[in-house]
Amino acid sequence: MARDRGIVAMTSPQLPAVVESAQLTAALRRGGVLDAGAVREVKVLHQRDTLVSQIVRLGLRYVGESAGAPQSLILKTPNSAFAESLANGGRREVDFYTQLAPKMPPGLVPRCFDGHFDEDGPTWHLLLEDLTDSHEIATKWPLPPSREQAMAIVTTLARWHAAWWDHPGLGDTVGTWASAEDRAQHMETFAGHYDRFADLLGDRLGEERRTLYRRLIEHSARLSQRYHSRRHISIAHGDAHIWNFMLPRPGVADTVRIFDFDQWRINVPTSDLAYMMAMQWYPDRRQALERPLLNRYHETLVANGVSGYTRGALDQDYRLSVLWHITGPVWQWSINIPPLIWWNNLERVMMAVEDLGCEELLG
């Protein structure tokens, strides 16, 4: 959510009908932030494309009483080049904001004023709170965060996990459980990708790493028992790198917000921690922050009502999640993510596996 780069009249034909004044007025009234007034004018303040979506910052002007109403909003829509191939991600994000977010404690994610997925398109949109002026991303990718920033991020992640920890709606009204058969099929697909990945890399993938992959595939059913226990489980973000968190700007008294929920799912929550640290940080930074952040995460879980989950269980889950994440670079390669990303992820996660002795979990 970058700062403005000029104000342009709203003439872009691809914007959905929800940005029309009457529909915006109705959405803001449903959200409880606009009473007697009405939206009079809408302007595009800034527009940018990401890999999978289009982000538009809208400026609003009102007629009548509008005290407390937002002066700007974020409109998120699919990137037209990927609207069909990645439609499921859009569906999941709309589901998150419209079904899960309203049931969560405030201050964890941006407020959503409207969201809709159109199966016929397939297309979708989200109308979100604009945090541009109050929040910022911690660093420019791929620079890791400061200790203070990392602590704030992990505190919010723990609060979010705690909100769904062993929730009775998991698999019923909240997400779906993957069956043993589902996970077996998933690993069979992965094994096919891995074979092609290994062939491509040749001697750039050493024999020790090849053995690690083969053993993970062989023992995947046993390792999946932790997931199938359905205990100490929550909603995982699925893409919890630090650049999917917005931190309050200096001088702003507010909380960290999480965004981009196109990959959320029921999972062992340490999957997010392992993705954030083991996959994204080189050893020196990870080793400096890993233990303090795991301590903070556990303390925050306990402070937010999670019981019966020991610090030792957290360590065990974290190591198992790090081991699972060696599959990540292969999946990324399989969907044509650039080597700049998956190759560095591969190197970092393999060093974490070695540091943490994760291979012991294979028996």
Image (cartoon, rainbow, N blue to C red):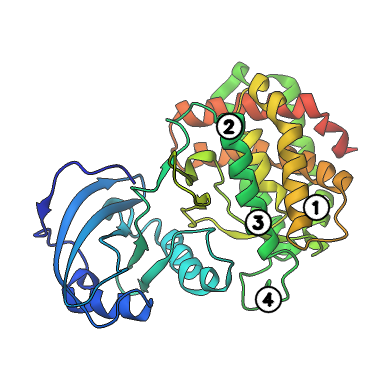
- Relative placement, left or right, of 326 versus 356 is left
Q: Tell me, yes or no, whether the two marked residues, 4 and 3, touch with CB atoms within 8 Å.
A: no
> Quick one: which residue is furthest to the bottom in this view?
36
Tell me the SS state at disc 1: helix
Residue neighbourhood size for the residue with mark 4, other residues' Cα within 10 Å, grouped as few (<14), some (14–19), many (≥20): few
| Distance from the alpha carbon under mark 4 to that under mark 3 | 18 Å
Amino acid type at image mark 3: Arg
**Mark found first going from the N terminus, 2 or 4:** 4
**Residue 299 coordinates in the image, percent (x, y):** 77, 48
What residue is rendered at 67% in x and 58% in y?
A: 161
> What residue does disc 3 label?
159
Q: Tell me, yes or no, whether the two marked residues, 3 and 2, touch with CB atoms within 8 Å.
A: no
Which of the two discs, 1 and 2, sits closer to the camera?
Answer: 2
Instruction: Residue 22: name its quadrant.
Output: bottom left
Residue neighbourhood size for the residue with mark 3, other residues' Cα within 10 Å, grouped as few (<14), some (14–19), many (≥20): many
Amino acid type at image mark 1: Ala
**Residue 271 coordinates in the image, percent (x, y):** 68, 47
**Residue 107 coordinates in the image, percent (x, y):** 52, 60
Which of the two discs, 3 and 1, sits closer to the camera?
Answer: 3
> Exactly how many numbered labels are in the figure?
4
**Mark found first going from the N terminus, 3 or 2:** 3
- Relative placement, left or right, of 34 versus 150 is left
> What residue does disc 2 label?
280
Mark number, residue 221: 1
**Mark found first going from the N terminus, 1 or 4:** 4
What residue is rendered at 68% in x and 50% in y?
A: 187
> Quick one: which residue is furthest to the right in this view?
363
Residue neighbourhood size for the residue with mark 2, other residues' Cα within 10 Å, grouped as few (<14), some (14–19), many (≥20): many
Instruction: Residue 174: name its quadrant.
Output: bottom right
Q: Nearer the viewer, residue 10 or 159?
A: 159
